[in-house]
């Protein structure tokens, strides 16, 4: 929402500066995109590092994957906010972004399963960045965890504990729908609620979450990493599509306000003969109010009048 308001108000200033010939609108779009990427990187480090490694204590092996996923997802939605804000009213920009954000949350495969969404609304699932960023981020966090607290391995045949303080003591409720690399199931300590017992390893946790969220990736590291690259790449392509639309909009829409290499206002010198009519060489169409004002300026001594210069 902040991006929508800031972009909409900023473009009003950009139109005035482009009209004065300060820079080309495409240059503004490219420079702002570079600054946006740097800002997303700083935002990602400030958000992911303290929470994942500082508070939750996840392993550093998946930090770079989680960081890249977060940056790509935030960059994609920030780009969408910029694109829909190329309008005159900030409220209209906010409304445009909310109309895109709400379907993104609803049809991201989190609240509704993909197979439960009917066509053509199911197409929305595949074109929103969060659809690909959500499973990628979960995989980056959990795939590298080898041993979680209060969870232990168990034999899938005898249902007896293999490690932990419960070895050779009791028969446990061994969960066998997700096995680790050694073919063992898992169980949790008695004081752990059943809904909190998700797995002993990170991949087992992903398997348990996949029972509820069908979009979760729960593959071995080789296949999982390949899917992570493809999912993040899809989210990046979606963001890149909106970025191209934004650059085109910034380059085309302010062009009607641009006076590049057309006319410049210079102080009138009473001793010199200056044109009494506004410069018309390659000039864009102006409203009647602007034409009357320029005509009045050309007839008033001591005011400013436009002078032509060649297009570079």
Image: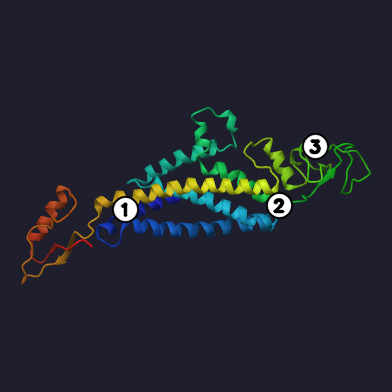
- Judged left or right of residue 76, residue 219 is right
Q: Residue at x 8, y 57 (%)?
A: 277
Which disc is residue 144 wearing?
2
Counting from the top left corner in percent of width and height, residue 198 is at 74, 41
Discs 3/1, front: 3
* Quarter assignment of residue 211: top right
Quick one: quadrant of the C terminus? bottom left
- SS at circle 3: loop
Mark 3 lies on residue: 176
Q: Residue at x 56, y 41 (%)?
A: 131
Q: Sequence-wise, which precedes: disc 3 or disc 1?
A: 1
Which disc is residue 256 wearing?
none
Total number of numbered labels?
3
Mark 1 lies on residue: 12
Vertical side of 119 occupied by 17: above or below: below
- Judged left or right of residue 26, residue 295 is left
Q: Sequence-wise, which precedes: disc 1 or disc 2?
A: 1
Q: Sequence-wise, which precedes: disc 2 or disc 3?
A: 2
Q: Nearer the viewer, residue 127 or 49?
A: 127
Q: Nearer the viewer, residue 144 or 270?
A: 144
- Judged left or right of residue 50, residue 16 is left
- SS at circle 1: helix
Counting from the top left corner in percent of width and height, residue 247 is at 37, 51
Instruction: Check contact, mark 1 vs mark 2: CB within 8 A.
Output: no
Label 1 and label 2: CA atoms lie apart by 48 Å
Asked whether residue 4 is in view, the answer is no
């Amino acid at each position: 929402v902040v991006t929508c308001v800031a972009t909409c108000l900023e473009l009003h200033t950009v139109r005035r500066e482009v009209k004065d010939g300060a820079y080309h609108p495409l240059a503004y779009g490219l420079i702002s995109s570079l600054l946006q990427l740097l800002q997303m990187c700083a935002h990602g480090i400030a958000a992911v590092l303290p929470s994942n490694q500082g508070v939750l204590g996840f392993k550093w092996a998946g930090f770079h994957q989680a960081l890249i996923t977060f940056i790509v997802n935030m960059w994609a939605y920030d780009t969408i906010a910029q694109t829909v804000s190329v309008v005159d009213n900030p409220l209209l920009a906010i409304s445009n972004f909310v109309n895109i954000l709400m379907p993104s949350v609803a049809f991201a495969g989190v609240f509704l399963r993909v197979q439960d969404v009917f066509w053509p609304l199911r197409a929305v699932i595949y074109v929103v960045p969060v659809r690909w960023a959500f499973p990628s981020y979960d995989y980056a966090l959990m795939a590298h965890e080898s041993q979680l607290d209060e969870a232990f391995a168990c034999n899938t045949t005898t249902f007896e504990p293999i490690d932990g303080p419960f070895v050779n003591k009791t028969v446990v409720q061994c969960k066998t729908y997700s096995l680790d690399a050694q073919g063992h199931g898992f169980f949790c300590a008695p004081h752990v609620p059943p809904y909190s017992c998700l797995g002993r390893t990170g991949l087992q946790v992903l398997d348990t979450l996949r029972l509820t969220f069908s979009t979760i990736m729960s593959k071995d590291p080789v296949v999982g990493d390949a899917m992570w690259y493809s999912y993040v790449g899809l989210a990046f392509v979606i963001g890149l599509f909106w970025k191209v639309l934004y650059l085109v909009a910034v380059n085309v829409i302010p062009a009607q306000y641009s006076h590049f290499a057309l006319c410049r206002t210079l102080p009138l010198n009473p001793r010199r003969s200056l044109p009494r009519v506004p410069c018309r060489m390659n000039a864009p169409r102006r409203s009647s109010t602007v034409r009357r004002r320029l005509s009045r300026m050309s007839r008033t001594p001591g005011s400013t009048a436009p002078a032509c210069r060649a297009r570079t």
